[in-house]
Image: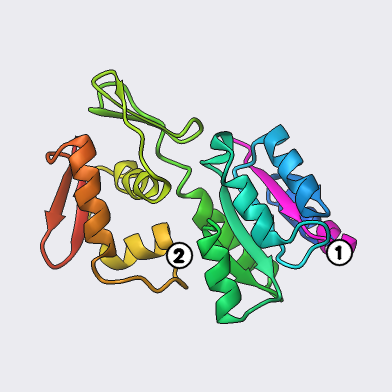
Amino acid sequence: MSYRILLVDDEPDILEFISYNLNKEGYTVYTASNGREAVQKALEVIPHVILLDVMMPEMDGIETCQEIRTHPELAATMIAFLTARSEDYSQIAGFDAGADDYITKPIRVKVLVSRIKALLKRVEGTQSAPGRALQMDRERYLVVKEGQQIVLPRKEFNLLALLYSKPQKVFTREEIFSSVWGSDVVVGDRTIDVHIRKLREKIGDDHIVTVKGVGYKYED
């Protein structure tokens, strides 16, 4: 599978350099030089990952991220800010706007590729195999149980997708925080528990098992 990445930055040198290196890794790379162009391009190609600068003309990165999150067809797209802005308030604003990760420049290419692969792991493994109790389709952002479609908020879907990707594997709380909320996000200790409770209310109590003192696992 050739993953699609949309790179958004108003500096041509950065677009060229990162595009070259991501193409070498086998990704299909699209570019945009401002926020408005990014939204149009995203709706056209439906990328798996968007790398988004914060400071841009016409529409800044925060506004662009918020706009992208209003389009249901882009709900499954992972958004990572790639920016020189490292202030805490900028990172908080980015995550509040709907970003999945926040990466500060400068960054080595190998590290950037590693961060992209971590985002793509959330996409992998969610295509359903025949006979599974729940059907999940990351491309269409669907969860189906016994023929009935279940609508989940973004974080609940990502949490379920993580557990669903490896049935019987126990995911620690640290793994869940890192994969679903990002390693740089500070959330309360009860955040996972609240999301698990909401998931159980919607998909049933028999699929998500608590492993006391460790984390959670998914069972068909």
Residue at which label 1 appears:
11
Residue 8: within the magenta? yes
Measuring from the top left, give residue 171's x and y in whole percent.
Answer: 26, 57
Farthest right residue in view: 12
Query: In the image, what residue occupies the spot 58% across and 65% down?
Result: 94
Image disc number at residue 182: 2
Please state which amino acid type lies under the numbered disc 2: Gly
Q: Classify 10 Å Cα crowding around label 2: few (below 14), some (14-19), many (20 and above).
A: some
Query: In the image, what residue occupies the spot 23% across and 37% down?
Result: 202
- Quarter-of-image position of residue 152: top left
| Horizontal side of residue 161 vs 219, given as left or right | right
Front residue (pair 164, 70): 70
Measuring from the top left, give residue 10's x and y in whole percent.
Answer: 84, 61
| Horizontal side of residue 13 vs 90, given as left or right | right
Instruction: Kindly state the secondary structure of the residue where label 1 is placed.
Output: loop
Q: How far separated are the C-alphas under marks 1 and 2?
A: 26 Å
Examine the rendering and report whether any part of residue 79 can be seen: yes
Q: Which residues are magenta?
A: 1-16
Query: In the image, what residue occupies the spot 65% across and 51% down?
Result: 50
Farthest top residue in view: 147
Please state which amino acid type lies under the numbered disc 1: Glu
Measuring from the top left, give residue 145's x and y in whole percent.
Answer: 26, 26
Farthest bottom residue in view: 87
Q: Where is 64 relative to 43, above or below?
A: below
Residue 15: within the magenta? yes
Which quadrant is home to the C terminus? top left
